[in-house]
Image (tube, rainbow, N blue to C red):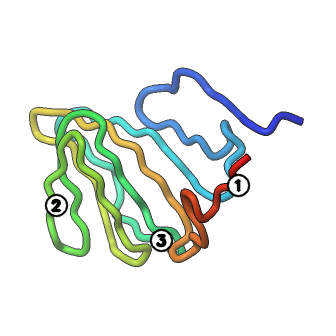
Amino acid sequence: MKEYTKTGALSSGRAELHGVLQLTGAEISVNELPAGASVPFVHSHKKNEEIYAVLEGEGKAVIGGDTVALKKGDWLRISPSAKRQIFAGETSGIKYICIQVKENSLEGYTRDDAVIY
């Protein structure tokens, strides 16, 4: 059995990588919204925090009543219980990655979790 999974080009709109990459500890999606569009619902999570990385364009996130401007290069972390909705800019679309992981589940990282050979 291979110890890795690779995928190529992803569809536009929304592509979830959980099944494609056989992820066991995170959900990752690549998302594109055209100018003036938004995620069509407000949502929160029971256990998962979300980390957003803006790849292209601009927009905003409305989080618990606060409006947070987003642009290429921005990173944003949102607590599970926070109500959120993502919007593209009025004249610019937005492309972003969303990573979901269970809050407070990271026990080791980088060198703490590495085995050096």
Q: Residues within 10 Å of mark 1 (few under 14, many from 20)?
A: few
Q: Where is residue 80 in the image (x, y as percent from the top left)?
A: 43, 73
> Decide: marks 1, 3 in contact (CB < 8 A)?
no
- Disc 3 marks which amino acid? His
- Name the residue that disc number 1 marks: 115
Q: Residues within 10 Å of mark 3 (few under 14, many from 20)?
A: some
Dot in front, 1 or 3: 1
Say which quadrant the N terminus sits in. Answer: top right
Q: Position of residue 26 (x, y in %)?
A: 59, 56
What residue did someone put label 3 on?
A: 45
Q: Mark 2 packing: few (<14 Cα in 10 Å), some, or many (20+)?
A: few
Query: Which of the marked residues, 2 or 3, is nearer the chain's N terminus?
Result: 3
Answer left or right for 58 relative to 44: left
Q: Nearer the viewer, mark 2 or mark 1?
A: 1
Q: What residue type is labelled 1?
A: Val
Q: Residue furthest left?
A: 91
Q: Please report the residue visible at 66 percent of the width from the left and 29 percent of the height from the top.
A: 6
From the top left corner, tell me how far across and down residue 46 is, in percent: 52, 76
Which amino acid is tagged 2? Val
Say which of 37 and 22 sits in front: 22
Image position of 15 with respect to 106: above or below: above
Placement of 40 over or under 73, stated as above or below: below
| x and y percentages locating residue 76 in the rendered image | 30, 58
Disc 2 from disc 3: Cα separation: 19 Å
Q: How far apart are marks 1 and 3 (CA)?
A: 33 Å
Helix, strand or loop status at disc 3: loop
Choose between 36 and 49: the one closer to the eye. 49
Instruction: Identify which residue is drawn at 31% across, 65% down.
Output: 84
- Classify mark 2: helix, strand or loop: strand
Q: In the image, which disc is placed on residue 68?
A: 2
Q: Residue at x 33, y 50 (%)?
A: 39
**Badge 1 element:** loop
